[in-house]
Image (cartoon, grey):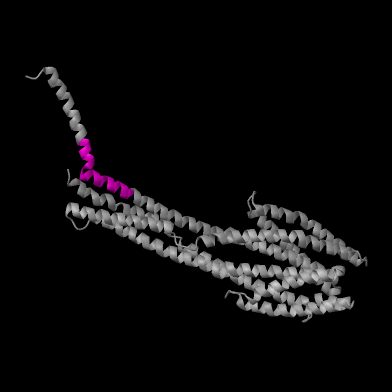
């Protein structure tokens, strides 16, 4: 006979044990596993869609920023350098010229300074407060008034026949060549590198989004295979709908990613790379022109400036002769031809200086005739500027196309994901009800 206390103890113990076994068995049961798998697939679907959408939106935003801010800043920095260099050359031309040529040169000098000032303002408006470019701009802005003051002093002394005017002009040109232009060149290099970074980074498809979608589609297919074996049904309409929706999104992401990456790569190959070469060529040409001016102004340092002129023109000739790009190739060839005649004119100027014929040397360097250095310099720089504009146009067209390809992908990925996710509960709910 069982003792009442013992019976009471057993009655209190058995339900607890039974409840523990029921919970354990429930977690191992097929309905619970199906529910957990459905929740995991639903979360994974939403995450994969958000990943695809975020990557597309980030790429588009970066490309739009490149078009609206980064690339124009690089362009402004290049224009700033070119304007400052042209101002220096025009100041020397105006100092060495007489009459009408002097007035035209002074007009070019004033116009170049005005352009440089406008580019200073435009660039400073877009740069951040802690940007290294801000320091470079400040350096240029603080030294430019000193330069213009020296130029005006040189012209004032020249008008009254004071020979010290040449010393002031040489001092102004030295300030420009040694301090102002290097800062402008560093600013241009920084802005150009900033513009190239997004293009190089987006030259490949969005593999993270593609990989997430491929893994999710594989999980959906595996789930349908397992369900078919367990429930003895061939297809699950809800999961099949989700699989088809995500497969369509995968094709869209893959296609848009490849097309956008191809356009970004083309922007580098046909835009950024030629533009970098042409910008460097323009800088070398302007540096050579500055040394030619100083060679005539500072006759006591003739050999120094002549050596620097040869070095700059040799490097420029190397760039033009080995120009590897299709965009701007005709203009590069024209610049190379003009460079040869420029060097020949420079040699005639040097020969005239060696015999003390300053008038002929001056006319050869700053005249407007077909054999003057100034004419050939304008041809070289004009050809390079035209080629640079073409390369910039290619760059902006390709980047713009890469951005447009991604325009609808961001919101489209969210829409397809939300629609496709509905198929998961719709597909699993009928199977779960069979276990009730």
Give coordinates of residue 139: x percent, y percent. 73, 54
Answer left or right for 233 relative to 348.
Answer: left
Give coordinates of residue 29: x percent, y percent. 20, 43
Identify the image quadrant of residue 234.
Answer: bottom left
Check residue 233 for magenta coloring.
no
Q: Is residue 370 above or below residue 183?
A: below
For the residue pair 196 and 121, the one nearer the viewer reads as: 196
For the residue pair 228 and 67, the one nearer the viewer reads as: 228
Does residue 107 show up? no
Give coordinates of residue 320: x percent, y percent. 65, 75
Give coordinates of residue 303: x percent, y percent. 82, 71
The chief SS type of the magenta part is helix
Locate the C terminus and report the quarter of the image it occupies.
top left
Q: Residue furthest left?
A: 1
For the residue pair 90 and 288, the one nearer the viewer reads as: 288
For the residue pair 181 and 67, the one nearer the viewer reads as: 181
Residue at image x 38%, y 55%? 212
Identify the image quadrant of residue 243.
Answer: bottom left
Answer left or right for 243 relative to 109.
Answer: left
Check residue 29 for magenta coloring.
yes
* Magenta-colored span: 22-42
Q: Is residue 391 above or below residue 18?
A: below
Answer left or right for 299 relative to 214.
Answer: right
Answer left or right for 346 relative to 234.
Answer: right
Q: Is residue 189 above or below residue 434?
A: below
Residue at image x 51%, y 60%? 201
């Amino acid at each position: 006979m069982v003792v009442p206390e013992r019976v009471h103890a057993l009655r209190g113990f058995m339900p607890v044990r039974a409840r523990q076994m029921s919970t354990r068995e429930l977690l191992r049961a097929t309905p619970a596993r199906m529910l957990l798998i459905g929740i995991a697939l639903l979360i994974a679907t939403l995450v994969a869609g958000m990943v695809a959408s975020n990557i597309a939106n980030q790429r588009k935003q970066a490309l739009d920023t490149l078009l609206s801010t980064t690339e124009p800043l690089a362009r402004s920095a290049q224009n700033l350098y070119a304007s400052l260099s042209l101002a220096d050359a025009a100041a020397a031309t105006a100092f060495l010229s007489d009459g009408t040529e002097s007035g035209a040169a002074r007009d070019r000098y004033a116009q170049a300074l005005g352009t440089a000032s406008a580019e200073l303002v435009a660039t400073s408006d877009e740069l951040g407060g802690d940007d290294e470019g801000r320091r470079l701009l400040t350096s240029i802005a603080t030294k430019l008034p000193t330069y213009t003051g020296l130029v005006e002093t040189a012209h004032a002394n020249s008008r009254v026949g004071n020979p010290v005017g040449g010393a002031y002009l040489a001092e102004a040109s030295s300030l420009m060549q040694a301090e102002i232009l290097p800062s402008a060149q560093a600013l241009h290099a920084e802005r150009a590198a900033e513009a190239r970074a997004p293009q190089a980074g987006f030259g490949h498809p969005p593999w993270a989004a593609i990989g997430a979608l491929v893994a999710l589609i594989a999980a959906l297919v595996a789930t349908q295979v397992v369900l078919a074996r367990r429930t003895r049904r061939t297809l699950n309409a809800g999961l099949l709908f989700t699989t088809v929706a995500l497969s369509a999104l995968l094709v869209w992401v893959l296609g848009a990613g490849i097309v956008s990456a191809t356009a970004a790569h083309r922007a580098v190959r046909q835009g950024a790379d030629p533009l970098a070469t042409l910008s460097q060529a323009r800088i070398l040409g302007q540096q050579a022109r500055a040394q030619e001016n100083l060679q005539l102004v500072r006759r006591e340092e003739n050999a120094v400036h002549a050596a620097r002129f040869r070095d700059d023109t040799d490097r420029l000739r190397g760039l033009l002769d080995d120009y590897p790009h299709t965009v701007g190739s005709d203009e590069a060839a024209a610049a190379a031809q003009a460079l040869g005649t420029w060097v020949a004119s420079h040699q005639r100027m040097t020969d005239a200086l060696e015999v003390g014929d300053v008038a002929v040397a001056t006319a050869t360097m700053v005249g407007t005739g077909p054999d003057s250095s100034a004419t050939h310099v304008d041809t070289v720089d004009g050809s390079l500027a035209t080629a640079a504009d073409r390369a910039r146009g290619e760059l902006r067209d390709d980047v713009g196309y890469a951005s447009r390809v991604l325009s609808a992908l961001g919101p489209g990925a969210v829409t397809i994901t939300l629609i496709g996710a509905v198929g998961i509960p719709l597909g699993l709910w009928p199977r779960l009800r069979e276990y009730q």
